[in-house]
Image: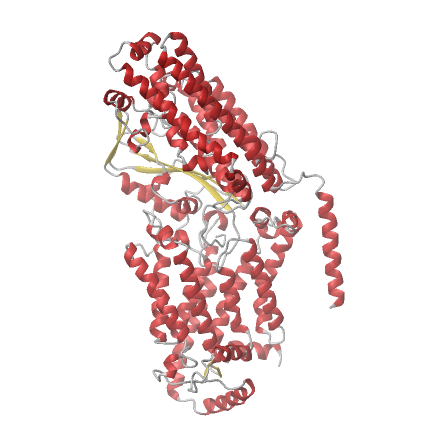
Amino acid sequence: MTAISRFQKIFFDWYREVPATSLAFYRILFGALMLFSTSRFLLNGWVYDFYIAPKFHFSYLGFGWIPYPNATVLYFIFSMMLVACVGIILGFFYRIAALTFFVLFTYVELLDKTTYLNHYYFVSLIALLMVFLPANRFFSLDAYYGFVPTQKTVPNWTIAVLKFQMGVVYVFAGIAKLEPDWLLHAQPLKYWLHTSHHWPLFGDLLKQDWVAYFFSWFGCLYDLLIVFFLLNVKTRNVAYVFVIIFHLTTWLLFPIGVFPWVMMAGTTIFLSVNFHEQVLNFLRVPGLRVPGLRLRSATGFKENVEKIEISATNNRTNHSHGRSKIINYLLAIYIAIQILVPFRYLLYPGNLFWTEQGFRFSWRVMLMEKTGYAEFYIVDPKTKAEWNVETENHLTRTQEKMMSTQPDMILQYAHHLHDIYQDTTIYLGDKSFTFNEPEVHAEIYVTLNGRPSQLYVAKNHNLAVLENNLSHRFWLEDFKE
Amino acid sequence: MKKHKSYLLLLLSSAMLISSCKEEDKPEFDRKAMLTNMASAVIIPAYQTLNASLAVLNTKALEFIANPTTTTLAELRSQYIITNKNYQRCAMYSFGPALDYGIKGAFNTFPTDSAKIEANITSGTYTLGSVANTTAIGFPAIDYLLYFGSDSEIIAKFTTDSEAANRKIYLSDLIFKMKTEFQPVLDQWNGSYQSTFIAADGNDVASSCSYLLNEFVKDIELVKNAKIGIPSGQQTGGATLPNYVEAYYSGLSTNFAYESLVGLETCFTGGSGSGLDDYIRDVESDDVTTSLADNILTQFGICKTKMDALADPLSATVNSNFTAVNEVYLELKKLVIYCKTDMTSMLGILITYQDNDGD
């Protein structure tokens, strides 16, 4: 098979029937990982730390209207997520379970952008896709009880779209690394490797500059290329070994939690149907001889699949053509969004790391060590009262850290301060300070990827009147290399 | 395949060679060694000094109470100054046992509430450890009792005044409380906490490095904001608040602030041993022209010089020579920026356990 025909097979032959095993396998793995991840979130007390303790919440642009749940509702939501994960694993009321998980997970993510992580975004996307995928037609309780017809094959696009999503994550993460800080200065890895761990043998090695450069370049090449090696049947097993080594290394070195496991699990979609089948065989409930829960041997299956493929091609009706047209459009829109969104930063002037306009939802991982020091001042132009805000009274430490380097959060916090101090009087000793229509000013210094700190926001702007929108943020100081 | 392996081996070994050559220019840095030095050569000695001076302070207070004269008052005052200065050099180690015993809040919450102190003395019944009494205890309260008026006025309050007996008890209660609270803090450092401190040599949020760095930065901010900023109106648009200075009654504000800068500098350098400055030099690229550690040390120097030049009492200077106070404030601010952004970023100390993919 030539490279071109293989390419066509992967990207255009989306209606070819393929074994449903892979999708069932992926459903179980995804459900199990989310069950683990959600439990971990609960057990670490993060529901309280990130969603109950903060007094103010940094909503996403356009999602400020989302009602904020109280503690009871939050814990209920997380419990429902756990239940939904079990439903996904078992394939029991699968569509409802997948939809529930997607909606609740995404809802929680939308509550506060302080906790934004690329892999949470990834989970949301996969969960969204899973809602539309017929992952319960095989090896599921839905099929077992006959809620849905058992189907031993599924259209190729259902697998391909998952591969595409993995590819997007890797390739864009790789493209994002094609910049001078990463390649020419090995930053921020140089600092992170140096300080992140203290291994008895490797500790000194990690301090060496060349190691940081090696990790940077290897990481960039890995991200750019791994998906193509995974797509190639001949190289995919070796590639998967690299996946494991790479992500285990990052897991050992950096506090990135569940992310490496999400990637190691996610990439299993590229492995052979045989492997997926073996895993399902291992999970099979012994003694149950029911369609949908029982598997044939690998070889028998292959023959069967070929037969089904032929019959599927022969029996394709107008109805399924019409349906595939809709699927085509939906997939095209989804793919276009996934490819265009990471490039939206090109619409803005200035350094992306400095302005962060178009930074999120773009698979920019591990690229910045950015730390800021922000002082906020409330000023009333009429009464001449001025007040230096103690941010620790209003934000958690994590929120403060995130806010002091991210312009949209700086504006949101400034607007929040305006609302707090409007029409208030503060008494201190024998003096009083009255704010009727307060201005909010900030003086912020930021250091980026090892550069000396420099002025980020000057004190002269009244942030209270600046709108938080998608337009260019003129009020940021220019970035000096 | 064999060929590839040998190439890789060649690459690795040559890289090792280069790196082993390089190691000679940089002294080896080890976080555990830094923590060991900080514990045994910096923190514990500073704690021991403070503990000893608290004991002497207690004795001097008892002597003064037994016989309130200008001589015993002068002796008590001079011991108060020594003890307070010793405390300034310990204040930034507000973690572990010191945090458990709430030393920072109990020893030095200012401005003190003289009305509350007087009410406590009048009533004669009080719980010094209560939250409400945070502003009626510690060094600021002693500062009030020993300096609120002229020598004769103070001695009169401790002798002929109708509440003299209560006042004596209050003073000795204050000092006894500090003495008995600090003893276990030192004991724990001499005991198990020292090894706990040294063992936590990671860079996570519960590591000793994290505690050390965070409290160091917090204390510099405290000098900038509470000791200089608030009284000089930096936080309030130029409206000065003279009675918000530290040690308002003795008027020794800048003395104590200077002392805390000295303590902070020692915390940064680790004295003559390994400290945060060595850590910075270790992480920094070899090709930097000026080390961040040198920038911070220079800035400490500038801050100390300007602080030293400020005229006491600060409560008067904030109005009489605002320019000079403002200069100190701006230099302290530079120090805070260095430490809170450049240094924090470089040393990669985490502030949360949360997953982080670095975005």
**In this view of the protein, which residue sits in the foreground, A43 or B303?**
A43
Residue A234, position as x, y percentages in the image: 63, 76
Left/right placement of residue A101 relative to residue B263 reads: left
Q: Can the viewer see residue B339 in this picture? A: yes
**In this view of the protein, which residue sits in the foreground, B98 or B163?**
B163
Quadrant that contains the N terminus of chain A: bottom right
Quadrant that contains the C terminus of chain A: top right
Left/right placement of residue A358 relative to residue B8 reads: left
Residue B158, position as x, y percentages in the image: 31, 12
Image point (48%, 45%), residue name: B206
Residue A274, quarter of picture: bottom right
Left/right placement of residue A387 relative to residue B26 reads: left
**In this view of the protein, which residue sits in the foreground, B88 or A54?**
B88
Residue B320, quarter of picture: top left
Image point (58%, 52%), residue name: A182
Can you name the residue that lies furthest to the front here? B66
Q: Is residue A389 above or below residue A206?
A: above
Residue B233, position as x, y percentages in the image: 35, 26
**How many marks are shown on the rendered structure?**
0
Residue B301, position as x, y percentages in the image: 54, 25
Q: Can the viewer see residue A65 in this picture? A: no
Residue B71, quarter of picture: top left
Q: Is residue A411 above or below residue A138?
A: above
Q: How is the image coloured?
A: secondary structure
Q: Is residue B281 above or below residue B255?
A: below
Image point (59%, 32%), residue name: B294
